[in-house]
Amino acid sequence: MRILSLGAAGFIGSHLTDRLLKEGHHVTGLDLQADKLTDYLTHPNFTFLRQDIRSPESNLDRLIQESDLVIDLIAYANPGLYLRIPLEVFRLNFTENLKIAEACVRHNKRLIQFSTCEVYGRTAASLKNAQLLNPEDPIHATFSEDTSEFILGPVSKHRWIYSCAKQLLERVLHAYGLEHGFNYTIIRPFNFIGPKIDYLPQQAADIPRVFSFFMGSLLTGAPMKLVNGGTNRRCYTYIDDAVECCYRIVENPGAVCDRQIFNIGSPHNEVSIRQMAELMRNIYAEKFRENPAVPLPEIVSVSGEEFYGEGYDDSDRRIPDITKARTLLGWEPVWGTRDTFERTMEYYVNEQCEAMTSSLAGR
Ligand code: UDP
């Protein structure tokens, strides 16, 4: 297939590009930079286009017309950005993505749209008035693609603009499916993690995702900060598991993915952010710490407002119901929590060593 991958150089896009090329597809990857794709730039089946889809010079319409399948990964998908630049988050994640979808409708192309598990928002158990017998039961935090309700906070909590933009995009794709027979598949990733997930924070202004903050702390000794005590919970999904499922969606056996939404995630890998900090610290001490005399970073608590600024709110807990991916695609995640973190950490430890070696060699 001739596949157009928009946002190919991001974390998910770079891993997916690797798989698509291994499977023999021709891939045109478009992104702002190619840092995570350097291994593929000379591959005979790969074309990289350094382009901003927001630029008036962008030739997106022609690229879509010439492809068999479009994969749209373009997004601002980092909570730090929802708080800082909510309008840009809306414009990119809704307005620009909508243009891509409408070009797919015009040219009758199948679209795989990456959305987010953030669309589910908060759990019913987190609402003050929830009268639940056992609020801790995972059933209250397990979200299904076609039946779960979405619970978002008030407009003043602008974190939700991302969730809301993605939700609206999903609804528009669904409507195009109904009215024009548009063929799309929506993917809702649940906290994918693995090598290349993010950059490590360098300056005070950097706000990557939590893994990178904790990794940065382990490498520098700075405190690991738990936002509001680190009680929120996430299910971390190793990128190899995630890409396996994404690839099955690309293949679309028996057209089972047509006009469907899929959760992709590891329901058994749930950890609170506090547990994650402790687990990463333990793994680091056991596997990667070179000098046991150097103390491990302390774990401290900070308020959400202090860490992110005004407008912070959060998903308290989210567990994917993956029945659909299991039954339609025969997919099952295999990576457990500890291995997932260990493999991801190993990548950053090696990166750091390489960076130190090359800076010493350059002296
Ligand atoms: N978080 C934290 N310490 C940090 C960064 C984030 O406790 O240094 C929390 C954040 O408030 C959220 C969770 O970790 O509850 C996951 O945040 P992340 O930015 O990784 O993305 P999310 O899973 O919310 O999309």
Image (spheres, rainbow, N blue to C red):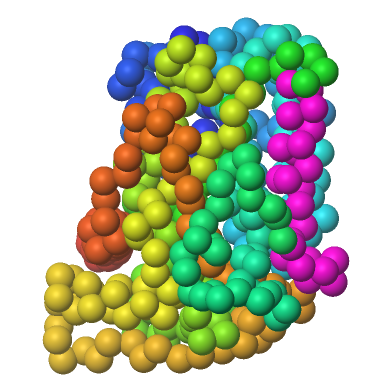
Quadrant in which the C terminus is drawn: bottom left
Q: Residue 185 appears in which quarter of the rendering?
A: top right
Q: Is residue 76 above or below residue 177?
A: below
Instruction: Give me the residue at 37% from left, 73% from top.
Output: 276
Magenta segment, principal secondary structure?
Answer: helix
Q: Residue furthest front?
A: 133
Tell me, yes or no, if residue 200 can be seen here: no
> Left or right: 205 with respect to 223?
right
Q: Nearer the viewer, residue 57 or 67?
A: 67
Q: Residue furthest right?
A: 155
> Left or right: 324 with respect to 279?
right
Q: Nearer the viewer, residue 261 or 203?
A: 261
Q: Is residue 166 above or below residue 110?
A: below
Instruction: Give the x, y percent position of residue 171.
Output: 76, 36
Magenta span covers which residues?
152-177
Instruction: Give me the residue at 64% from left, 82% from top.
Output: 304
Instruction: Give me the residue at 62% from left, 87% from top.
Output: 303
Does the magenta-highlighted stretch encompass residue 163? yes
Instruction: Give me the residue at 46% from left, 12% from top.
Output: 254
Does the magenta-highlighted stretch encompass residue 212? no
Tell me, yes or no, if residue 332 can be seen here: yes
Instruction: Give the x, y percent position of residue 190.
Output: 49, 52
> Left or right: 197 with respect to 65?
left
